[in-house]
Amino acid sequence: MIALIDYKAGNLTSVRKALAAVGAEVYTPERADDLTRARGIIVPGVGHFAATAALDDAWLQQIHRHVADGKALLGICLGMQFLYESSEEAPGLRGLGLLDGACFRLRPPAAAGLKVPHVGWNDLDLVRPETIASQIPNHSQVYFTHSYVAPVTADTVAATGHGQTFASVAQRGRVAGVQFHPEKSGDVGLQFLRNFLATVH
Amino acid sequence: MLSKRIIACLDVKNGEVVKGINFEGLRSAGDPAELARRYNREGIDELVILDITATLERRQALADTIRAVAKELFIPLAVGGGIRTEADAAAAVEAGADKVSLNTAALKQPELITTLARRYGSQAVVVAIDAKKDGDRYSVFVRSGTTETNRDAVEWAREAEQRGAGEILLTSIDRDGTRAGFHCDMTAAVSTAVSIPVIASGGAGGLDDFVDVFTSGAADAALAASIFHYAETSVSALKQHLRGRGIPVRL
């Protein structure tokens, strides 16, 4: 069973639908304790980093315990940013700290004439083979909608450019994150969800 | 590099696509789910369902249509037409819409933009602006282009952005249905005034109209209905053409 955490950051209909399409059995935990029966956890979310404050210490402890037990975790969009130590978007808040670095606002050079938020289909430049990106052709396009990003670090699996280069896919062990929306990225997106399921035991 | 998006619009009435359609191999030409599937195969980047049903039963019919289209499509889906309240938007989102498009309601009660942006995120809120050239400005119309307001399109787009809109869907009333090309001047005026994406609509006729709106029009996305419905232009042929002209697209 996959726990899809609903912390009221956006609507989860599309994520549920895409997970159903790849054969995942999903439940939404009501309380932090409900995470103990999860074989995999997905932290979705769109919007402001401050929304992650809804996940209090009890939730954070359960998520850390889940990861310490070697079980799989996937962060999507804001959920990926939450895997890092912090974000410029909500300076007082801490992230899960499962991946190193701080998220920051995209600031493309003015001369580039690029808009922020970054909305639409953009390329994945694969930099490191990892299970989350298996069978994904290099330079596949996926659907993004966000203003904040994670830095390129040793955990980066794919990078994307929008005036600045940022981590669009990251993985360390069984912890993975995708900045784009796999539930809205056609067949490529569904393959990412299948890859995540394959890491769930 | 971020691709320029090609968006297909389905005008739906009582669950059926109403603009003429001429696709071969469709079981029912008016079935929105079949048309959506076809566009998806051809590589459309996004779909808009525009509900033009005027009956009281419209909300249920629309939800059924959204569910049918969203069932097997995993690309962004926006829904517009008659979304007047938070409850209308919630019904569309719960049925599977990723974005709701507000038009008349956004001008009448602009706080609805903020309410929906707080509830679903700005990325889920599109403000649709229908405008007509009026001297050196662009005048905003509501109620399907029948009622003039005293608002200027550039100024209203800026306000919509400040209130939390995530995208602007800008339709030229002058060009809509003419196939004379998008209104590039108006699109550029709005697109350069805001930092959120602007989707150009109205006037698509030939392949080069899309080239123009992405270059001189500074559009982030372009929307069309009838040229795709009549299968005069396939989405894939359009994208090949754009790539040949150096415009980044998803192929």
Image (cartoon, coloured by chain):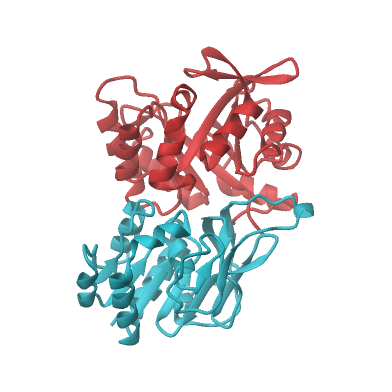
Chain colours: A cyan, B red
| Residue closest to the eye, B117 or B190 | B117
Identify which residue is drawn at 49% across, 67% down. Answer: A81
Identify which residue is drawn at 46% across, 23% down. Answer: B104
- Relative to A194, residue B172 above or below: above
Indicate left or right for B41 with B70 as reference: right
Q: Quadrant of the C terminus of chain A?
A: bottom left
- Measured from the top left, where is residue B175 in percent x and y? 64, 23
| Residue closest to the eye, A169 or B33 | A169
- Measured from the top left, where is residue B77 in percent x and y? 43, 45
Identify which residue is drawn at 34% across, 36% down. Answer: B28
Identify which residue is drawn at 49% across, 38% down. Answer: B126
- Relative to A133, residue B166 above or below: above
Q: Quadrant of the N terminus of chain A?
A: bottom left
- Relative to B75, residue A70 above or below: below
- Measured from the top left, where is residue B2 in percent x and y? 64, 56
Residue A29 visible: yes
Residue B23 visible: no
- Measured from the top left, where is residue A177 in percent x and y? 46, 71
